[in-house]
Image (cartoon, rainbow, N blue to C red):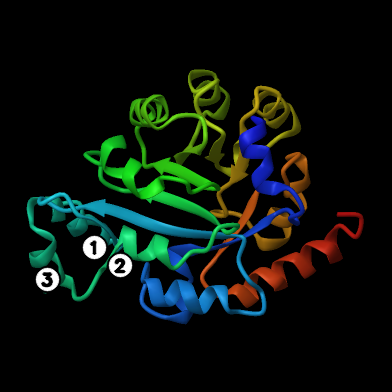
Amino acid sequence: MRPAVAKHFEGKRLPLIMAHKGGTAYGRENAAETVRRALAHKHKPDIIEVDVRKSRDGVLYCHHGSIPFGVFFATFFGLFSFRTITRLVGPRDTLADVLAAIPEGTLVYLDLKDPWITAADLAPLLINRTGVWIAPFWNPRWLMRLRAELGEAHAYAFNRPVFFPRRVAKKLEGQADLIQFFRWGWSRRIIDAIEGNDIACHMIEWFISRERYLASLPLSRYQGLFFSVYDLSDAAELHAARNRILPQA
């Protein structure tokens, strides 16, 4: 793994703890105040994950939407101004406000939902900030373009569950620092081939029991990299359960 990315894990226990949508057990999804409450929890997260969208008037704001219909309708929000969006779905925080709530030393995972988000949009918000993971949803060309324009100081994740991980990893060699895929691709042979090319592997938790999921993580040298949770107490329980299944982990 690139030295700039390896620094993100120094002194931290793997898998890392990710507060998904900022940690929705503690408030509104993707809100700065929710992030502050999550960071004050006794099980402080290593990573704050937020969903980033872009309004018609160029505002980067944080919103995911309910599954499945809220996410579907949110794909059309780019047609509206930020002010109109807040009228439609209620108060939303800008990415600038959320980043201001995250201190240096806490990793930030930016799940970019709108493909019209550009490096020029992100760059002013990321000046002098380290520990940022750029995770454009779905499109490998978008990832490559952002990396070329934002540079090597950040980490880049292919933010889409893939069915053929070695094929995707080959395409993204030298571009992505992380890809995520389903349990049926999670084998020593596949993981060694991918992580041998400096791409970390993360297993999607769908279609698998908790026990099998936890027992499978050590196949990755990065232990699957992170637990994605809404309630940080769940991450502590996951760590404890994994240690019961694999006392040597």
Quadrant location of residue 96? bottom left
Percent coordinates x, y for residue 86 in the rendering: 15, 70
Instruction: Measure how far apart labels 2 and 1 are at the Cα level.
Output: 6 Å
Q: How many marks?
A: 3
Q: Are marks 2 and 1 in contact (CB under 8 Å)?
A: yes
Side of 97 relative to 80 (left or right): right
Q: Is residue 105 left or right of residue 91?
A: right
Q: Earlier in the sequence, mark 2 or mark 3?
A: 2
Looking at the rendered image, the disc whose residue lies closer to the viewer, 3 or 1, is: 3
How many residues crowd around disc 1 within 10 Å: few (fewer than 14), some, or many (20 or more)? few
- In this rendering, the answer to whether 191 lies above or below 62 is above
Residue 40 lies, with reference to residue 19, above or below; the image says below
Tell me the crowding category of disc 2: few under 14, some 14 to 19, or many 20 or more residues within 10 angstroms, Cα based: few
Q: Which residue bears the numbered disc 2? A: 66
Residues at discs 3 and 1 in contact (Cβ within 8 Å): no
Q: 57 or 49, which lies in front?
A: 57
Give the residue displayed 40% in from the left and 46% down from the top. Answer: 126
x, y percent for residue 100: 41, 64
**Secondary structure state at the residue bearing disc 3:** helix
Q: Indicate whether 109 appears above or below 178.
A: below
- Residue tagged by mark 3? 88
Q: Quadrant of residue 134?
A: top left
Q: Three-letter amino acid code at disc 2?
A: Ser
Q: Quadrant of the N terminus?
A: top right
Q: Residue at x 60, y 44 (%)?
A: 202
Query: At x 50% / y 25%, what residue is drawn?
Result: 175
